[in-house]
Image (cartoon, grey):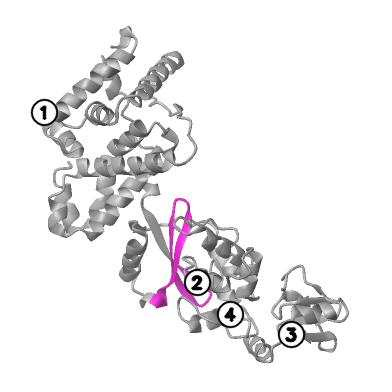
């Protein structure tokens, strides 16, 4: 259960921070992976996001920690890191986007299915990077990470209705980019 | 369905992801008393004599968390090679995590790592060896910020006038560390006060820093005291390849 995490964090940051990492590492890593288009950096970005969060928590008064919505707060940190990185990268020579991340192996697939799925995932992952920023953020957080609309709205800093329309416009655009059989 | 395809893009963090966030610490025996040593998955990133924090673990852990902004937990095992490196006074084989240390400081620390146990070099030597001969004070400041003292032996860098100079954990600890390595500080000081910076052998024709292992082997009858590189060159001496005086 993650409901009591803010409270436990506010009481004993050092004891509870490990649970924060365990509870949200997949959401944070997936966001870094799917938003950056650079899988080789995703683990570093995700780790850095948790370190920024930790440093901030050490400064925050207990009262403020207790009221945090941890997941949207963490994901906002990841998105800010990626944005700063992209800004820095735009001042450096262009980098080639890679699609070489490894898929989850569930053991029941044959190598061919796996290759095909890997291919499909890589393609879809690549298409995501073609969406405009806000739509990509909305689609990744809602449908890849599985964020409820209330939390998505908190991350985007907009009303829930607006968040919903970002998601649906993003999905429409993705469908238009995809071959018919996977729509 | 596109929603299902998107959901399948959720990916678990790599194995050992938490190790890239949480650092670990151990207490080990050092050359002149116990040390707290902290390390990440990339290497050792902090060393602190326990005496410096009054032996207080909580104080050490807390200061680490503030300084590095990284959570720190006790380790069950010391990093591989640490005990051996401390015993031998040779930190070259260990992995260090020097993220957050600037390029100049890194060059200073890498050079300092080359100074053998029982020998000392002047601050000016470090500056010259890393290609910034005028940055003597900057080299001193970089050593003062050394996050992994004792392992990277900044205590082996001293002033040209024979004084041992400053140390992050107080000048006395520097003296104690050098004594423990059997550096003849009395002689270094005596020579420095008289303006003698090099010793040469009139049999080999080589000149060295006084603490160089080769200088210590020169017999009294063949020992020549030199004040400057110019004097050494004028006497036809060549610099030692081991300690590279200059």
Q: Secondary structure at mark 4?
A: helix
Q: Which residue is mark 3?
A: B227
Task: Write the residue at 78% across / 72% down.
Answer: B239
| Crowd tier of the residue under label 4, counting other residues whose Cα lies within 10 Å: few below 14, some 14–19, many 20 or above | many
Q: Secondary structure at mark 1?
A: helix
Distance of label 3 from label 4 (alpha carbons): 23 Å
Which chain does the residue under circle 2 lie in?
B
Which chain does the residue under circle 1 lie in?
A
Distance of label 1 from label 2 (alpha carbons): 56 Å
Q: Position of residue B179 (x, y in %)?
A: 59, 82
Distance of label 2 from label 3 (alpha carbons): 26 Å
Farthest residue, direction front: A91
Distance of label 4 from label 1 (alpha carbons): 70 Å
Eye-nearest disc, 4 or 1: 1
Which of A70 and B183 lies nearest the eye of the viewer?
A70
Q: Are marks 1 and 3 in contact (CB under 8 Å)?
A: no
Q: Which mark is residue B35?
A: none
Q: Position of residue B97 (x, y in %)?
A: 48, 56
Q: Which residue is mark 2?
A: B141
Q: Quadrant of the C terminus of chain B?
A: bottom right
Q: Which quadrant of the structure image shows residue A119?
A: top left
Q: Position of residue B219 (x, y in %)?
A: 82, 85
Eye-nearest disc, 4 or 2: 2
Quick one: label 4 or label 2, which is nearer the N terminus?
Answer: 2
Task: Write the residue at 16% across / 30% down.
Answer: A163
Q: Secondary structure at mark 2?
A: helix
Callouts 4 and 2 in the same chain:
yes
Q: Which residue is mark 1?
A: A161
Q: Which residue is mark 4?
A: B178
């Amino acid at each position: 259960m993650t409901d009591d995490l803010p409270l436990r964090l506010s009481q004993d940051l050092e004891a509870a921070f490990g649970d924060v990492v365990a509870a949200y590492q997949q959401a944070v890593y997936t966001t870094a992976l799917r938003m950056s288009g650079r899988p080789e950096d995703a683990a570093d970005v995700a780790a850095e996001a948790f370190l920024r969060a930790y440093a901030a928590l050490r400064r925050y008064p207990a009262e403020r920690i207790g009221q945090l919505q941890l997941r949207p707060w963490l994901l906002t940190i990841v998105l800010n890191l990626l944005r700063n990185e992209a800004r820095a990268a735009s001042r450096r020579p262009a980098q080639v986007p890679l699609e070489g991340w490894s898929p989850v192996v569930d053991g029941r697939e044959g190598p061919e299915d796996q290759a095909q799925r890997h291919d499909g995932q890589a393609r879809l992952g690549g298409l995501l990077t073609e969406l405009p920023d806000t739509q990509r953020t909305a689609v990744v957080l809602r449908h890849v990470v599985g964020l409820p609309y209330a939390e998505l709205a908190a991350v985007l800093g907009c009303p829930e209705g607006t968040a919903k329309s970002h998601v649906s416009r993003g999905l429409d655009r993705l469908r238009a980019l995809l071959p018919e059989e996977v729509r | 369905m596109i929603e299902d395809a998107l959901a399948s893009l959720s990916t678990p963090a790599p194995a050992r992801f938490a190790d890239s966030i949480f650092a670990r610490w151990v207490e080990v025996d050092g050359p002149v008393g116990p040390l707290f040593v902290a390390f990440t998955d990339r290497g050792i990133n902090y060393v602190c004599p326990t005496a410096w924090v009054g032996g207080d673990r909580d104080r050490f852990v807390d200061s680490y968390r503030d300084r590095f902004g990284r959570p720190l937990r006790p380790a069950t095992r010391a990093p591989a090679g640490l005990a051996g490196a401390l015993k031998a006074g040779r930190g070259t084989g260990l992995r260090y995590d020097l993220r957050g240390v600037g390029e100049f400081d890194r060059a200073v620390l890498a050079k300092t790592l080359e100074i053998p146990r029982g020998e000392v070099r002047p601050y000016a030597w470090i500056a010259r060896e890393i290609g910034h001969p005028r940055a003597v004070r900057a080299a001193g400041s970089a050593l003062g910020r050394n996050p992994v003292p004792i392992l990277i032996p900044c205590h082996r860098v001293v002033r040209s006038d024979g004084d041992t100079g400053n140390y992050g954990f107080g000048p006395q600890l520097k003296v104690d560390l050098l004594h423990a390595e059997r550096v003849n500080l009395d002689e270094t000081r005596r020579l420095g006060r008289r303006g003698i910076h090099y010793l040469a052998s009139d049999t080999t024709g080589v000149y060295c820093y006084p603490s160089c292992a080769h200088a210590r082997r020169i017999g009294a009858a063949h020992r020549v005291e030199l004040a400057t590189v110019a004097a050494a060159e004028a006497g036809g001496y060549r610099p030692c390849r081991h300690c590279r005086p200059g």
